[in-house]
Image (cartoon, grey):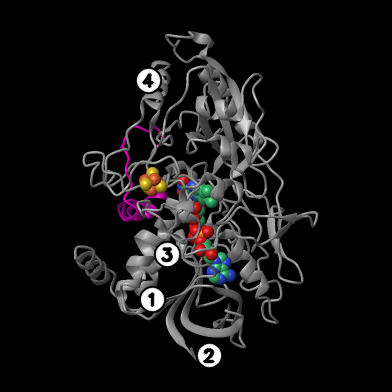
């Protein structure tokens, strides 16, 4: 391809942000180039092998970053078409209405967003439709109001999870069905694309039944002749015009060759850590601290949630196949005995002995890993971490990523764990073991220690925050760089605060919102584009 190749829009990265944006812009007829550093995830039996995925890390990047002390760090992240959504658990939550305002936490203030929940609500509704979310409106007491029901019914609980639901409800709680982007048709199991397997969370879907950004966005976008995807195309740098006001060249390393592309509009959608790194690597005379970084916020305020996996062990087995159906938000904003937010209780996919062998769980006396895996309920706890300017992404002289992170706001998380322990101790008596059925809570992580550590960057966000004030943010409310007229960032980096639910639906909804802004800027009428997309979807 000649180095002068010019497009209307270049999108760098094809995950929740970039993939969704490409889907939105594709029907416009504008020339769109997607540059993705990874390849398509191969469809092969290893997609569903816990050994290949969790022990060998077959699909993770082999790249090494550095921690704040300069020690090598192997990030658990994936570079491929569809980004990290190929591996996500497809739990697709809206942030709560309150998450868009200031929220006092025990550890400090969670700042307000420059847009309100109502600004994003129509796009949440669209994103739920696009990602085929299965859920039950109104069951989660913290859920914000919505303009439409979920497009598909909630995924049912298997008996052990239903039993937990009933126990929690008996104790006066409001457990609810996790909104899930899986293409499961429980009424028509024979023709259902999703087969409800036990290797969903953390694995790619071999039968393409998970609503990931490749399946629901990138592949449909590529059906348009005006959209081109280049894989194994790693963007190393963005160059600007002499004034520094426009990106003039996107520098790409592809198959060992340096290539250059340009576009009227350039969008970085590399994920929160890599988008920050790309802007920092693109420092120039006009942008000495990094592209669009006059404010010095680029790379700062890295957030990744305070997360733990906790195994609740029972004497009775847990034969659940697809475990990630139940969640509890009753402690999201606090409780009678604690006035500050604690967070969200949910599940990971069912753990097995192979996966456990990759980490260092506390082993219950008299139990093996296999027995523990067969008898555990495997909870996923999420609390909000606060935007600390010293938690940051930087790049060293060779362009290598360095990630500094000191956990904060941990008291709420500890209390959330204590709440779960308390609830598990009050489960109903089982017929065989009575109340002694519950053995205890055990922490589990892929590493030693109970919190998900630094390398667990699954929920990365917040490194290039959006806002009205160019002193405090690198992006304006439309996610355009304050200092560069044709540069946008559309991925998890725009979050000024992280909330305590999974981020992907918010990233996708925001991509649709920014997509409408770009269509307008490009002179493509939004209503017409949506109509074309609708008619093609019906083909
Ligand atoms: C195991 C796991 C489970 C998860 N479960 C959930 C869940 O249940 N619910 C939820 O909401 N979220 C979940 N997440 C998080 C979710 O996947 C992310 O929030 C989301 O994918 C982030 O979207 P993004 O667009 O910011 O980045 P990504 O989806 O990471 O996309 C970034 C893309 O940019 C590409 N890229 C990076 N740098 C460059 C470059 N220099 N040049 C070209 N391309 C580049 C990458 O290869 C990648 O394809 C999970 C994540 C993981 C890893
Ligand atoms: S078949 Fe269903 S449960 Fe299994 S990986 Fe695919 S989407 Fe997930």
Residue 262 % position (x, y): 50, 84
* Labels 4 & 3 near each other (Cβ < 8 A): no
Residue 521 — which label? 1
Closest to the observer: 203 or 324? 203
Residue 134 highlighted magenta (yes or no): yes
Query: Label 2 belongs to which residue?
Result: 3
Q: How far apart are the alpha carbons under marks 4 and 2? A: 63 Å
Q: How far apart are the alpha carbons under marks 2 and 3? A: 24 Å
Front position among marks 1 and 2: 2
Front position among marks 1 and 3: 3
Query: Label 3 belongs to which residue?
Result: 19
Pointer 1 or 2: first along the chain: 2
Query: Label 4 belongs to which residue?
Result: 166
* Labels 1 & 3 near each other (Cβ < 8 A): no
Closest to the observer: 206 or 171? 206
Residue 46 — which label? none
> Element at badge 1?
helix
- Badge 3 density bin: few <14, some 14–19, many ≥20, Cα 10 Å: many
The residue located at (44%, 45%) in the rendering is: 200
Pointer 4 or 2: first along the chain: 2
Q: For the C terminus, give its image quadrant.
A: bottom left
Residue 9: which quarter of the image? Answer: bottom left
Q: Does the residue labelled 3 lie within 8 Å of ligand 1?
A: yes
> Element at badge 2?
loop
Q: How far apart are the alpha carbons under marks 4 and 3? A: 39 Å
The residue located at (46%, 55%) in the rendering is: 85
Q: What stretch is highlighted in magenta?
A: 115-142
């Amino acid at each position: 391809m000649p180095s002068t190749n010019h497009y209307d829009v270049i999108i760098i990265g094809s995950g929740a942000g970039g993939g969704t944006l490409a889907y939105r812009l594709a029907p416009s007829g504008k020339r769109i180039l997607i540059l993705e550093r990874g390849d398509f995830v191969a469809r092969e039996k290893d997609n569903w092998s816990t050994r290949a995925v969790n022990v060998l890390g077959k699909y993770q990047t082999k790249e090494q970053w550095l921690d704040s002390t300069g020690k090598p760090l192997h990030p658990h992240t994936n570079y491929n078409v569809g980004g990290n959504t190929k591996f996500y658990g497809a739990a697709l939550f809206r942030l709560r209405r309150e998450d868009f305002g200031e929220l006092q936490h025990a550890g400090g203030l969670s700042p307000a967003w420059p847009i309100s929940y109502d600004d994003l609500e129509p796009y949440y509704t669209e994103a739920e439709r696009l990602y085929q979310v299965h859920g039950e409106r109104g069951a989660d007491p913290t859920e914000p109001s919505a303009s439409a029901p979920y497009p598909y019914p909630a995924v049912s609980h298997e008996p052990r999870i239903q039993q937990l639901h009933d126990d929690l409800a008996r104790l006066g709680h409001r457990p609810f069905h996790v909104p899930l982007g899986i293409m499961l048709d429980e009424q028509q199991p024979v023709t259902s694309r999703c087969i409800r397997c036990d290797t969903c969370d953390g694995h790619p879907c071999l039968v393409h039944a998970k609503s990931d950004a490749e399946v629901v966005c990138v592949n449909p976008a590529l059906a348009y002749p005006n959209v081109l995807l280049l894989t194994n195309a790693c963007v190393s740098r963005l160059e600007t015009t002499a004034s520094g006001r426009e990106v003039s060249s996107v520098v790409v390393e592809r198959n060992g060759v340096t290539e250059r592309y340009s576009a009227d509009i350039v969008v970085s959608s590399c994920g929160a850590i890599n988008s920050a790194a790309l802007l920092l690597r693109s420092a120039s005379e006009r942008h000495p601290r990094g592209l669009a970084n006059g404010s010095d916020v680029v790379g700062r305020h890295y957030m990744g949630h305070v997360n733990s996996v906790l195994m609740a062990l029972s004497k009775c087995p847990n034969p659940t196949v697809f475990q990630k159906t139940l969640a509890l938000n009753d402690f999201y904003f606090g409780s009678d005995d604690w006035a500050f937010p604690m967070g969200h209780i949910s599940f990971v996919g069912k753990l097995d002995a192979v996966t456990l062998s990759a980490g260092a769980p506390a082993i219950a006396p008299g139990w093996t890993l296999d027995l523990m895996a067969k008898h555990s309920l495997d909870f996923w706890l999420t609390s909000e971490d606060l935007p600390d300017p010293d938690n940051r992404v930087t790049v060293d002289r060779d362009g290598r990523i360095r990630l500094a992170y000191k956990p904060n706001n941990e008291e709420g998380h500890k209390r959330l764990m204590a709440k779960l322990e308390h609830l598990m101790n009050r489960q109903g008596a089982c017929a065989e073991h009575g109340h002694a059925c519950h053995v205890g809570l055990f922490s589990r992580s892929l590493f030693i220690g109970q919190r998900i550590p630094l390398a667990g960057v699954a929920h990365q966000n917040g490194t290039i925050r959006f806002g009205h004030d160019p002193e405090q943010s690198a992006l304006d409310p439309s996610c355009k760089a304050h200092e560069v007229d044709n540069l946008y960032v559309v991925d998890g980096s725009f979050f000024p605060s992280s909330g305590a639910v999974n981020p992907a639906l918010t990233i996708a909804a925001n991509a649709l919102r920014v997509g409408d802004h770009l269509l307008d800027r490009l002179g493509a009428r939004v209503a017409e584009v949506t109509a074309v997309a609708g008619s093609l979807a019906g083909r």
